[in-house]
Amino acid sequence: MSRIIVIGGGIAGISAAARLAPHAQVSVLEGEASLAYHASGRSAAMFLLNYGNATIKALNAASADHHRHADGGVLSSRGMMMVAGPDHLAAFWADSADLGLDEVTLDEAQRLWPILNRETVAHAAYREDAQDLDTDLLIQNFARSARAHGAQIVTDARVSGIERTSAGWRVTTANGQVHEGDLLVNAAGAWADEVARMAGVTPLGIQPYRRSMARIALPQGMSPADWPFVDGVGESWYCKPDAGALIVSPADEDPVDPQDAWADDMVLAEGLARYQEMVTAPVTRMLANWAGLRSFAPDRALVIGADIGDAAFLWCAGQGGYGFQTAPAASQLLADLALGVTPALDPAAVAALDPKRFA
């Protein structure tokens, strides 16, 4: 049985481990004290089939059945709305078409989202089948499956050295542990290029971008439980119900170095101002704020498969803002390629995800 080391314990690494563990001896190395600490633990995930470019949409479609049914499913009803002011009609139509939203009257929009400001919102569109995705449950399901098939999941295992050996790979962690494997899976998220450099592999230009979030209070007695996810036209902001409050993001995408990210106060203020313009409920109190990193390859598609220079080094990176919604199909593709199985995913999508496209 082959030995596979997975670096990274976010949704990419844990889902890959779950797919690989029935067929290989798998070790997952996570540098933090818990799984899903960085991007995966800070995501306001939704499942929307039409979100992303054509390659991402293919992964969405291939992931849908798993999200709906595996382990009882991780999806729940939410709905998605987009709103726009009178000066953004062209962008409104373009975004509505891309996301598969249907225009609704302002009366219907306000019924669905009672805080809509009729004085500033001129256009609204909606689709009912957008769903919340329980990120914590999905992580737990994949981790439980990986462990059930013998995978070793090691936290507090920050990688300090990677050595290519005649037999495969030797990975050393900061606490002195040594792990050896035949294959190495780079699922390190924002640190994916750094892991590649440590392994002597050419980086692919995977860039982390900061995404800030704020949880804000609503007026007393107002419950958002049944409200939709709402997106400003051009993804200029978005909001989502969360435990009796609202999560609001300025949808920022500022390039940063890999790090334990934090929200920028000015960016949050500007985003909250854009949100405030479209609603009647005043922003009076911020309950919490945080930031995560969304890491993209240069062409904004995931990178899944063997490195062009070393077939024993597999990339599972560049998830951007699509990591959770694509995880079932992306991890299955990674496992198929690692195990020499013909992928079930459409060949065009497989090629579009292949690291060799950057050669």
Image (spheres, grey):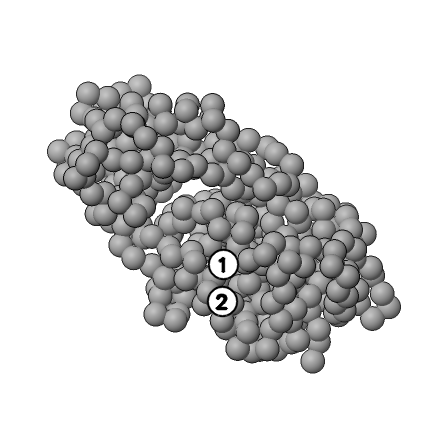
* Front residue of this view, candidates 202 and 251: 251
Relative to 110, 5 lies left or right: right
Q: Is residue 223 visible?
A: yes
- For label 1, the SS is helix
Relative to 200, 56 lies left or right: left
Rendering coords of residue 252 (x, y %):
48, 32
Q: Mark 1 sits on what residue? A: 327
Q: CA distance from mark 1 to mark 2?
A: 10 Å
Amino acid at dot 1: Ala
- The quadrant of the rendering that contains the N terminus is bottom right
Q: Are marks 1 and 2 in contact (CB under 8 Å)?
A: yes
Residue at position x 48%, y 51% in the image: 41
Residue at position x 36%, y 62% in the image: 74
Relative to 128, 29 lies left or right: right
Q: Mark 2 sits on what residue? A: 142
* Front residue of this view, candidates 227 and 79: 227
Relative to 304, 263 lies left or right: left
Q: Nearer the viewer, mark 1 or mark 2?
A: 2
For disc 2, the neighbor class at 10 Å (few under 14, some 14 to 19, many from 20) is: many
Rendering coords of residue 321 (x, y %):
49, 45
Q: Is residue 187 visible?
A: no
In this rendering, the answer to whether 185 lies above or below 86 is below
